[in-house]
Amino acid sequence: MAEPLDAALTEVRALLLDPALTRAVAAGRRRGQRPSVIRAELRPVTLKAGPRLQISTSDGARPYTRNVAPGSDAAAAVDALLAEPFGNWHVETADATLQLRVTKSGEAQVHRAAATRPAATPGGHDREKEYLLDPGDPFFAEIGGSAAKRRQVDAFLRALAATLPDELTGALRVVDLGCGNAYLTFAAYRYLTGRGLDVELVGVDVREDQRQRNTELAERLGWADRVRFVAGTIADAVVEPAPDLVLALHACDTATDEALARAVRWNARWVLAAPCCHHDVAAQLRARPAPAPYELLTRQGILRERFADVLTDALRAGLLRLHGYRAEVVEFVDSQHTPRNLLIRARQTGTAPTAEQLRDYRELVDQWQVSPRLETLLATDAPVVTG
């Protein structure tokens, strides 16, 4: 049943400012309106200065994260976000979950449920022992080690562990393209060095302020001699020598394609890419009718967007296979934490593509009349996919 939007947002506000908040995400847009950012995520963190509300936003090109103090600062920041015309809110607390969707008529459809995850029990350490990084590691104190962040770090590290061979030893050069606030970058370094590897890691982000922030954090952790950051675009940032492992986690839209293209040109041995939005192929699908008999796949906007996600990542994986990689698309983290939960995991094998792989890729592209950005970026290196 629809509810007045103002009353529903007042309830959301109370949950966002509740000390029991664990995570909240705002996304989408209301009919005929556009928020100033495409996504906002809120979560509590504990810093050296005390508890803070961490607010991470993205305008589709770059992320921005800030930590605000409880009280009037947090209330003002929350009110500003609630004033944005987001179409959806998802709020989790220790006790409950609320999902709000703004209808076309401007009312609120609200679903409320009790928390699905049991509260932690005193002295219960069995779950903590399963983490690849000890939750008490000083690393978490620096990045703000909330339970949700530890879960995401652990999910990422398990995907990384499954990608690299167990017998890997010696030196490992790593680059993280579009590293943002770099907490997964640092987590990778901490985990890999814990395996006895001699790791040299470079984080790339377009923002100079992020480079400075991440460099300062590397210095505080005592890792500045092995972990460095450069400001530049994914396509053009100078990274020398070429890396063995390429990370690209939640790079927006075609930025993921730029990261995959650089990985292929570097002939990187391993690639982990968690795509974010998929606007490029979605726009191409909107511009022309779907091939028969698939009109029902793209007639509805939400189905077209989800299909564009699937088609984009399927074509990316297919292109990687054509360039000598064994590529898989797997779940990154549980969908309850983020809808963008897929991970493209690739290992360089040097195997030439088969005629069947070439044919299947070409037929899929031709049937849907799309021009994958990754194919364009690799065109000079990949005559095999043009015919």
Image (cartoon, rainbow, N blue to C red):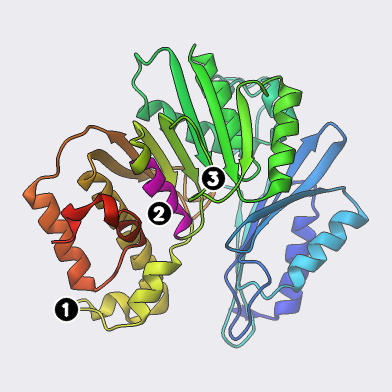
x%, y% of residue 300?
A: 37, 80
Find disc 2 in the rendering and name its residue: 257
Q: Residue 144 vs residue 240: left or right? A: right
Q: Nearer the viewer, mark 3 or mark 1?
A: 3
Q: Please name the amino acid that badge 3 sits on.
A: Ala
Q: Residue 145 vs residue 359: left or right? A: right
Q: Is residue 385 visible?
A: yes
Q: Please name the amino acid that badge 2 sits on.
A: Asp
- Tag of residue 237: 3
Residue 385's quadrant in the figure? bottom left
Q: Earlier in the sequence, mark 3 or mark 1?
A: 3
Find disc 1 in the rendering and name its residue: 293
Please identify the quadrant where the C terminus is shown. bottom left
Q: Which residues are magenta?
A: 254-264
Of residues 242 and 219, the one drawn nearer to the viewer in this rendering: 242
Rendered view: 286 above or below 272 = below
Q: Residue at x 32, y 77 (%)?
A: 298
Residue at disc 3, secondary structure:
loop
Q: Residue furthest left?
A: 355
Q: Residues within 10 Å of mark 1 (few under 14, many from 20)?
A: few
Main structural element of the magenta stretch: helix, strand or loop? Answer: helix
Q: Residue 346 vs residue 120: left or right? A: left
Q: Residues within 10 Å of mark 2 (few under 14, many from 20)?
A: many
Q: Residues within 10 Å of mark 3 (few under 14, many from 20)?
A: some
Q: Residue at x 91, y 52 (%)?
A: 71
Of residues 237 and 375, the one drawn nearer to the viewer in this rendering: 237
x%, y% of residue 63?
A: 64, 54
Q: Nearer the viewer, mark 2 or mark 3?
A: 3
